[in-house]
Each structure stands twice: as structure tokens, then as C-alpha cells.
Image (cartoon, grey):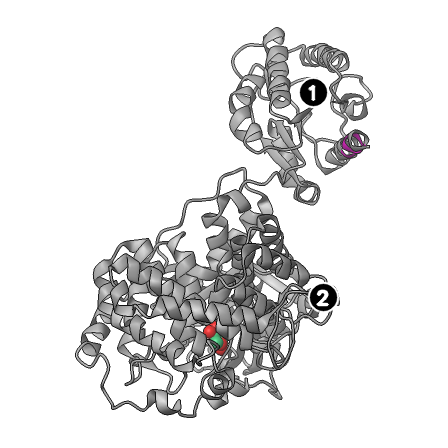
Amino acid sequence: MKKIVMLLMSLGALLSASADAYYANDRARWLSIAEESTPQLTVTEVAPVGVVEVVDDETAYQHHKIIPAYSIDSLYNAPFSEVKTAIVDFGKHITGTFSFSIRTTDKVADGPVRLKLTFGEVPSEVAEPFDPYPGKLSRAWLQDEIVTVVEIPNTITIDRRLSFRYVKIELMAYSPYYEFNIHDMVCKATTSAASAPEPLPATVDPVIVDIDRVSLNTLSECMQTVYEDGPKRDRRLWIGDLYLEAMANNCTFQSHELTKRCLYLLAGLADDNGFLLATVVERPKPRPQEKQFLYEYSLIFNACLKDYLKATGDTATVLDLWPVAKRQLDIVRDYTGADGLIDFERLDNEWWVFFDWKEDLVKEVAAQGLAVFALNQTLELADMLGKRDEISDIPALAKKMRKAARGAFYDKKKGVFAGRKDPQVSYASQIWMILGGIATPAEGRKALAALETLPDVCTPGTPYLYHYYIQSLIDCGMPERAREALVGYWGGMVKKGADTFWEAYDPANDFISPYDFHPINSYCHAWSATPSYFIRSYPEIFQNTRWCKAAFMGNSITENWLRVHPGFFADNKFAGRGISGQTSTRMLNRFGKDILDLKPEYVIINAGTNDCAENDGFYDEELTVKNIIKMVELARKNGIRPIMSSVLPSSGFSWRPEVKDASERISRLNTILEEYARKNNIPYINYYPLMLAKDGKSLSEDYCNDGVHPVAAGYDVMENLVLSTIKDLEN
Ligand code: RAM
């Protein structure tokens, strides 16, 4: 934080060149290209889903838990002078303009109503008081507004665009001589991410699917007319955020015009010496934040440009901006001493060196690694443009810096990289030595593994650094750990209720805030949106794992099961693959796609009810048995352990009253299946006797409403059988 203040200082000799020396002839044109590339925003109307309450709960994220209270219609019809306070839930995080209406219910409004509206991305913002405000950034970022409505009925739209899931409405003043309702709340949600990316294959671990979904929500909400860092705060373009957002966009929404606009904006607003400022505010007219020079961000621009070229092939744009990339290299040239090391003390005095929001992080090693990373990225870019000759000194500089870093920072004994003055071992140091190509893959693996065992390691405080951690795990050949880390970190946020990912997250500290007040954190943040990039760029790591313990093949009985008890499936890593109405023939047809591709450890087959009910127009017992056996054999051949199960009892099917011998058909089929399972040593789950009614042929009324489909109590019985069968097989 001290660095933000420090930015107001001059950058000394480096920046003392004469005004307008750089890109003077191009700036206006660049800014007009940026303007022309402004994307259209798509607007979607979102209505609230209910009224909730926030309760204190030590086990919940930031100690607040949301519980449903009553329906939105009840709120709209209630006299608001009695309601006084309500927290409305929009069901998901959204960014846009908020409106509500107010009407009288009986008499004429004889005086104004004053309301306080507080918008929250997470529960703490609608639960904790904002004042006295202890935070570092402007209190006005917090989304609370006082609205006085003089004319009633009326529809009020809050001027400021908001970013929220919850709205707290508090009644501050009103006239006792008439009654009124608050109603028709709506948010016109905006994004420039137009087309939805391909959904992930159905075989992907649901945990990964969830992380991807939240990641896409985060990214699309940050994608407005620039890549914003966060739609709640600071609502502006930062180079580091752009780099990660564009990376995720390249493999999801592919809104490349937005990236182009941002690159041109930054270039057109560089300082007179050609160095990029870290951040640009868009309105009323685009301008950079004065003196906001952030070391890594200026250099990362080059990586961004390279990625853009790779994703689009738009050589014209990249050639146009190539002089900017070239100029940023002077930062490395200028701060690298004869010994090949970045003069960290000088750098730290003259620039904001960021890397992560962590007060105690020692940044010397990371600064060197990042510099070499930027040189390598720029060389790659130069090669793509045929411009290597214009930066012909860079390969030798990179080599010298690599060698110097190994000499100065590598502790061979401990297998980690640490600074010269302060031997702190941090994630940031190891990560940037790996990404800069200074550590060999083997050294990288050792260093990253050591982070988990050494004491006093400086851990990441934000998803920004965590992104680079995952990348370094992948780059040095630790794919399993990369997956675990992604699931642990971003999955950790999902478990804590995130529907967009956060600016700051430390699994051990829910209240972490770079600004001394957690409600001012941004909870939908650009640099947190990269899981989708990893998941989609490395499908072999994130999409192809054998996550599934058992898959359930079946009909509506299985399909409903997942709906009635989703927790049973999620908690046990089970996958429900039931489709209503299906016979064994149809199940066999989709067995490859739905089961074999999923690669579960076990498959539990429940087929036969719809065969007996003649859903394909006939019943052929032999065919049903053959189909089921075929599924068993296919599973076995593919290394999946089959588990057979009995058809549930039923004395008739409401949709096929002409079948009079349902229970006889089912008993006979079950006898054959059980016999086959016994002979072939296949586990068999016998639901039948436990689910049978006293009449000896129907499904017990305790377990169903319609004679065929179990309700929750029936599934409880079945679940015990499933779990004990699997337990026996594992022992
Ligand atoms: C924060 C912003 C942004 C980041 C800078 C360094 O204030 O939210 O995401 O890039 O810091």
C-alpha cells in the first residue's frame, strides 16, 4: 500500500526525456481506434428471486449466512411501513442499473418516502455497518444510496451502475397518513461478452464445471466497455487485469475487439516518455491515472500483445503497437546492473513493484524473474512479427540475467530461491523464477514442493498471484498438483458461496482485505477469472480426470434421485445418468457416451421398469436381460466395475394401464438378473424386498406417491444399500 502513495514521485532519469518524444504522431489515431473498437453492451433484465435474512454463523464465510425468508410477491404486497427492512436476493451476482417502483395502496401520498438502499456482492455488505469507515479507499465505493421519493406512484432508477446480488432496503422516513408498497425491482444487467462459450463436456468433474461457471460469470461481468478490474471497484482498466482477462477471453467469449480497444487505450495514453501507465479511467474521457507506474504491469503489456496476436492473427494492430512494446524493454535495460541483476533498491524506490497484496512480501527475486519473463515474451512476439533484429541485444541480456539470478538467489541445499538481503521464502519468488525460465523444471518442482513443507513461507493473498502459481505448476510438470491447487483455491471460494470470484482470497483468513475493510474488497474481480483459461486450455489436466466414484445408469427413478438428493451425489462423487422413460435398449445406446466416457470406478445399472411398461411398444424379457448383460460386459471391458440392481416393485403403471401383470414381470426379471449376478460374481443391490408394500407386489406407500417413483424416504433406503455395497467392495 505504501507504494500507491509513492507513485506520486518522479521516476528520475528514466523519465526525463523531452515531452511528446514518443508516439506523438500516433496517439490521436490510436485513441480513435480505441473509440471505434468500443463494444456494444448486451442488456438482460434480471428480477429478484426472494427475500432473505442474514444470520450470524461462525462457520459461514465472513460469519454471515443467508437464509430464505419469504417470497418476493409477499414483499411487493406488504405495507412497507410494517416491513421497514428487507433484504432482497437476485439469485446471482449481476452488474447493471437498478430500478424499483413505489405505489400507494389506499390514500394519496401526502409526503415523501425516504429509503436507504445498500447493495452487496456478498452477505457481509448487507450485514455489517459501513461507518465509522476504517478503510483506505474512498468510502463512496461502498454501494449505499439514500433515495427520497416525493411523487408517488413512481419508478426510480439509481443513477450509478451497481454490482450486487443482494439489496437491503431500509425505511428511513415516511408519512403515517398513507400506506405504500415497494415493488417491481429489476436490474438491467450489462456485459460486452456476447456469445457464450461451448459448455464443458458432460464427463467433466462437476467441481470443475462449477468453477468454470463462476469464472465465466466473473469474466463476463468484468467485461464492460473495457476489461474492468471489478464492476464494483475500481471499475477501470489495469494492465495486469487485462492480461489475465484477455487470456481467459481468448478461450471463452473471444471478444477480441475489447482487447484491441484496451491495448490501444493504454498505448495512446502512455506517458510522454513512452512508458505505460498501469491504469486508465474511461469516463468522462479516457485518461490514465497520473504517475501510476507499476513495474510488472508495464512489462506485462508485451505478453498481452503477444497473446492477442496469437489469438487473432491481427498483425496490423500488433505492428502498429510494436514500438510501445519495444520501449517497455528499456525499463529492464535501465534497471539491470553490470552484474545482470535488477537494481531492486532503486526499482523499489522509483516504481510501484506489486506482485501481490501482501504487506510482508519480499519482491527482489520476483522482480528479476518477471523481467526475464517479459524479455522472453517480447522475443517471441518479435519472432512472430519478424522483428528480432530490432531487439538484437535482448537474447544476451536475458541470458546474463538468468545466470545472475541463479548465482544470487538459488539455495541449492534447500532447493528454493530467496533474496540476498532478506532470505524470505515466498510463493512469488519460486513462481517467477519458474515463469522466467530461470529454474529448470526439476528445480521448479523441488521449489514448489518445498513451499508446502518449509516454515514461514509467504503465501499468496490474491488470485492474481495464485494464477501464476497454477501456471508455474503446469510449466514445470506438476499437472496433478495444479489441478488440486485450482480446485482447492477457487473451489474453496465456491464452497464459501462465491458466484463470482473475489479480488482477495486467503483460505485461512476470510477477512483479508488490502484496504483494511473487507466490505470494500471487490468480490467480482478480473484477475480471479482465469480458471476458465486453465480448464479450457489444458483439458488433459482439468477435464480428463477419473473423478467419478460411481455412475448411476437408469430411468426416471435415477433422474429424480439426483434432483431429490443432490447432496448424495455431490458428497460421494456419484454421477446421476438417469433419463426419464427409457428402456434398457435406450440405455445401452447411450452407455458409451454417458458411462464409458465418464470413466467412473463403478456403474450401478437400474433398468427394466420401462421395459416392463412397454415404453418401446412391447416387452421382451430376453431382450431386456441381454441389454443389461451387454452393459455389464461393456463396463467390465473398459475397466469399470459393474453393479447390478433389482427393478423396484410396482403393481402397475399409470401411463400403461393395459399392463396387468407388472409385478409378475418385475419379479421374474429380478430373479433372472440376480441369478446372473451371482453366477458371474457381480455385486447386486437388492432394493426390491426393502421397498415392497405389505401386499407383496407394490412399491410401499411409505416410499412413493404414485406407485412407481420413490420420494425422499425411499431414496434414503436405497442410499444405505448403495453405500454399504460400495463399502463392502472397497474392503
Ligand atoms: C487493485 C485493483 C486492480 C489491481 C491493482 C494493482 O487496486 O483492484 O485489480 O490491478 O490493485
Count the numbered circles shown.
2
Kind of residue at badge 2: Leu
- Camera-nearest residue between 262 and 511: 262
On whether ligand 1 comes within 8 Å of the CB at mark 1, the answer is no
- Decide if residue 601 is on the left or right side of residue 50: right
In the visual, does 535 lie left or right of 511? Answer: left
| Residue 490 drawn at (x, y percent) | 58, 58
Above or below: residue 718 compared with residue 27? above
Front-lying residue, 32 or 38: 32
Classify mark 1: helix, strand or loop.
loop
- Judging by the rendered image, the residue that carries numbered circle 1 is 647
Q: Main secondary structure of the magenta part?
A: helix
The quadrant in which residue 640 appears is top right
**Residue under the point 60% across and 67% down:** 427
- Quadrant where the image shows the N terminus: bottom right
Bounds of the magenta span?
723-727
Figure quadrant of residue 595: top right
Q: In this orientation, which residue lies closer to the viewer: 621 or 463?
A: 463
What residue is disc 2 on?
454
